[in-house]
Each structure stands twice: as C-alpha cells, then as structure tokens.
Image: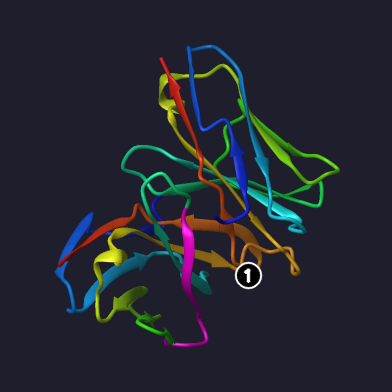
Amino acid sequence: DSGVTQTPKHLITATGQRVTLRCSPRSGDLSVYWYQQSLDQGLQFLIQYYNGEERAKGNILERFSAQQFPDLHSELNLSSLELGDSALYFCASSASLTGTVQETQYFGPGTRLLVL
Amino acid sequence: DQQVKQNSPSLSVQEGRISILNCDYTNSMFDYFLWYKKYPAEGPTFLISISSIKDKNEDGRFTVFLNKSAKHLSLHIVPSQPGDSAVYFCAASTNNNNDMRFGAGTRLTVKP
C-alpha cells in the first residue's frame, strides 16, 4: 500500500460526458502528479501540482484539467470524453522537498476509465 | 514522441537466472533515470534510480547500468525470482524540466 488513494476504481461513461477523478496523496506529500496509461502504452505524464499550484504540464489535452485543494487532495477533470480517452489514470505523490519530478513518486492504484 | 523506448514488450526467464531489461532514450538532456515495477491492479512502485553522473547503481538483487554515449540503460535482476514477475517501466527526466517520460513497459515472467 503506497498510501496514495484514488477514487473511483472503475468508471464507465459515454462519449461527450464529463468525469472527475479524485486523488489523496500520502500524508505530508506536497506534490501530486497525474498520468494516463492507454492500452499498450507507457505512462504519459499529464500534470503536476505542488502545494496547490500547477508546477508542470505534460501531454495534457485542453479538455482535461486538474486542481489541488488546500487539503492537498487533487482532482482530474476530463470533459467532452472521447473513446480514445479510455485508459488507466494514475495519481502519484511525492514529498517534493525539491519540488521536482526527480523525487521518488508513490503511485495510487489507478482509476480505470471506459468511455463507450 | 517516444523519447523513452522499451523495445521488448515481454521477457521470460528461468528462476535463478539473470533478467536483463533494456531501455533506450533519445533526449540527451535526460539526467535522471528510474525503474518502476507494476503488478496487475496496482500502481507502479519505485524500484531503483540512477543519476547521469553515475554509470551503475546497485540495490540488492537489482542493478541499473547507464551508458550515456549509447543513450541506453538496463536493469539487471539476479537471481530472478517468481515474485519479480511484473511489468517494468523505465522513466527519464531532466532536472530543469518537470516532466517524466516513461517507456511502454516490459512484462517480465520468471518461471519456477
């Protein structure tokens, strides 16, 4: 158990819809990262938040957005969903003493999104 | 763009033998490399890392080798155990760009 929790575990929705994925980082971790893993693909870094502020952006679509709340939990919002958005979405956290990605990240179990 | 590539989607090894997982990268600015292990229905877990100032880092049965001139790194597991069966992801990052790039993963199967 990494200490990172993600809800829901599974999500099935239709094209055009909007969903929100939630992540609670390990206690005390300031950074939260979101990743997408599509079928047969590696993890694609989407976005990082550090202590409530956006820190880095990766291959995140404009239809996707995220935020980190004062209690450090984070939400990833996916809108106007397309079939190709079906994937595993992982959240990770790190203590972020340096605020960079070069710290060990602890991953949650992921949310499996299926868009029909 | 696939800046980090793991060209072998799968690898099968006998218990007790050495497992060698390979990873190639294209961005010469990468200066920090990691390996993550992932079991089914779980998130990836950190395994071992190496900075570009080193060419080898060892942690128990796991050793990572970095060849900067070839832009290649490898993970050696010796001796391999059935519990090592998992998907292994290689990842790379640069110190001044908060972006971690992952490979597609290699599924290792260690047979008893």
Q: Quadrant of residue A105?
A: bottom right
Left or right placement of residue B10 versus residue A90 in this view: left
The residue depicted at 27 percent of the width and 61 percent of the height is B85
Extent of the magenta region:
B44-56
Residue labelled with disc 1: B95
Determine whether A2 is above or below A65 in the image: below
Determine whether A88 is above or below B48 in the image: above
Query: Label 1 is placed on what type of residue?
Result: Asn
Residue at the farthest right position: A70
Left or right placement of residue B99 versus residue B48 in this view: right
Q: How many marks?
A: 1
Percent position of residue A24, x then y: 69, 44
The residue depicted at 60 percent of the width and 39 percent of the height is A6
Q: Quadrant of residue B47?
A: bottom left
The residue depicted at 30 percent of the width and 78 percent of the height is B76
Label 1: which secondary element: loop
| Colour mapping used in the image | rainbow
**Foreground residue, B46 or B53?**
B46
Q: Is residue A58 magenta?
A: no
Majority secondary structure in the magenta region? strand
Percent position of residue A93, x then y: 65, 55
Q: Is residue B49 magenta?
A: yes
Percent position of residue B16, x then y: 18, 79
The image quadrant where one finds the C terminus of chain A is top left
The residue depicted at 73 percent of the width and 58 percent of the height is A29
